[in-house]
Image (spheres, rainbow, N blue to C red):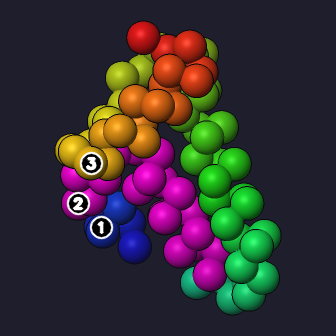
């Protein structure tokens, strides 16, 4: 999973790739409630993105189109330029 995460980071962008990675890790850990998995993965990726970009001022990969649109929209909602 980690190798796939690193390989897809430039294409999918940080937010989408991290969301999928967290969801996959939770599922591999044998947790089965999909609504909880989706909520934790989405919230966790959003929290990581916020901390890295707003607190640490780290530039994260936004991905390639059409995936970059998601990253750019989230950055705009969080006030990141």
Q: Is residue 39 above or below residue 67?
A: below
The magenta-colored residue range is 6-27
Residue 66, percent from left and from top: 27, 48
Q: Residues within 10 Å of mark 2 (few under 14, many from 20)?
A: few
Q: Nearer the viewer, mark 3 or mark 1?
A: 3
Q: Are marks 1 and 2 in contact (CB under 8 Å)?
A: yes
* Residue 21 falls inside the magenta stretch: yes
Q: Is residue 62 above or below residue 65?
A: above
- At 53% from the left and 57% from the top, the residue drawn is 19
Residue underneath mark 2: 7
- At 78% from the left and 70% from the top, the residue drawn is 36
Q: Nearer the viewer, mark 1 or mark 2?
A: 2
Real-space CA distance between mark 1 and mark 2, rounded to the nearest whole angstrom: 6 Å
* Residue 17 falls inside the magenta stretch: yes
Residue sitting nearer the eye, 10 or 28? 10
Residue underneath mark 1: 3
Q: Nearer the viewer, mark 2 or mark 3?
A: 3
- At 65% from the left and 74% from the top, the residue drawn is 26
Residue underneath mark 3: 66
Q: Secondary structure at mark 1?
A: helix
Q: Secondary structure at mark 2?
A: helix
Decide if residue 81 is on the left or right side of residue 8.
right
Dominant SS of magenta comes to helix
Q: Earlier in the sequence, mark 3 or mark 1?
A: 1
Q: Are marks 3 and 1 in contact (CB under 8 Å)?
A: no
């Amino acid at each position: 999973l980690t190798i796939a995460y690193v390989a897809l980071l430039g294409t999918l962008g940080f937010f989408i790739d991290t969301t999928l990675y967290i969801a996959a890790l939770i599922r591999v850990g044998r947790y089965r409630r999909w609504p909880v998995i989706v909520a934790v993965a989405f919230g966790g990726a959003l929290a990581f993105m916020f901390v890295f970009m707003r607190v640490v001022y780290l530039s994260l990969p936004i991905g390639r189109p059409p995936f970059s649109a998601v990253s750019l929209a989230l950055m705009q909602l969080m006030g990141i330029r």
